[in-house]
Image: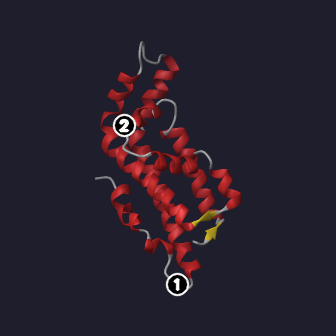
Amino acid sequence: MAMQTKDEEIMNLIDTIGQHYRTNLGNRYVRSAFSILPLDNKEWGLIESVTEKAEYHRYQGYHLDELYERIVALARFVYHARKELQPQLRARLSTYSSGPGPLGNDKILRDMAVNNFDSNLSILADLVNKLYARAVELDMEMARGKTPVYKSMRELDELGTYLVPG
């Protein structure tokens, strides 16, 4: 069984990620377009456990392997949102609305969400990268001469590809 942590820095980063995601990415103006992302139900569940249900883990703590799974799911979200969603976000949102589009304030807020989507994805990528770096740091401290958990998780090898634009 992997080590468990209630590290304050990790908890604060997760809170920041959740707040940023809910406000700037997974908000009501953009969320409907997420259906095109090739993420399975397990990945969406892992993302939701960080962005919507983190308070459970604040008391419980995280097993490092569970934390790494969530980091990979968030990184895959960033990657696919950049690659498949961002280039066509405005067009997708206009085809989803049946009838007249949003008016007044709603239109302004939706346009802001669309216009800032790319930079908000970059902010999320940076936060996920910080979370990963802190998790690895803790993992190495907790391993005490044994093999750290992150070294046994092959999915983590893709993290750089997922988080760096290009």
Tell me if mark 2 has few (under 14), some (14-19) or many (20+) residues whose alpha carbon lies within 10 angstroms of its own.
Answer: few
Q: Who is closer to the viewer here, 87 or 96?
A: 96
Circle 1 residue: 146
Q: Is residue 81 above or below residue 2?
A: above
Disc 1 residue crowd, few under 14, some 14–19, many 20+, Cα 10 Å? few
Residue 137: percent from the left, percent from the top?
Answer: 53, 73
Q: Residue at x 40, y 49 (%)?
A: 78
In the picture, which quadrant includes the N terminus?
Answer: bottom right
Q: Residue furthest left?
A: 166
Where does label 2 land, which residue? 36
Helix, strand or loop at disc 1?
loop
Relative to residue 24, is residue 7 drawn left or right?
right
Q: Whole-Å distance between the Cαs marked 1 and 2?
A: 41 Å
Which amino acid does the dot numbered 1 rest on? Lys
Dot 1 or dot 2: first in sequence order is 2
Residue drawn at x 40%, y 46% as measured from the top left? 39
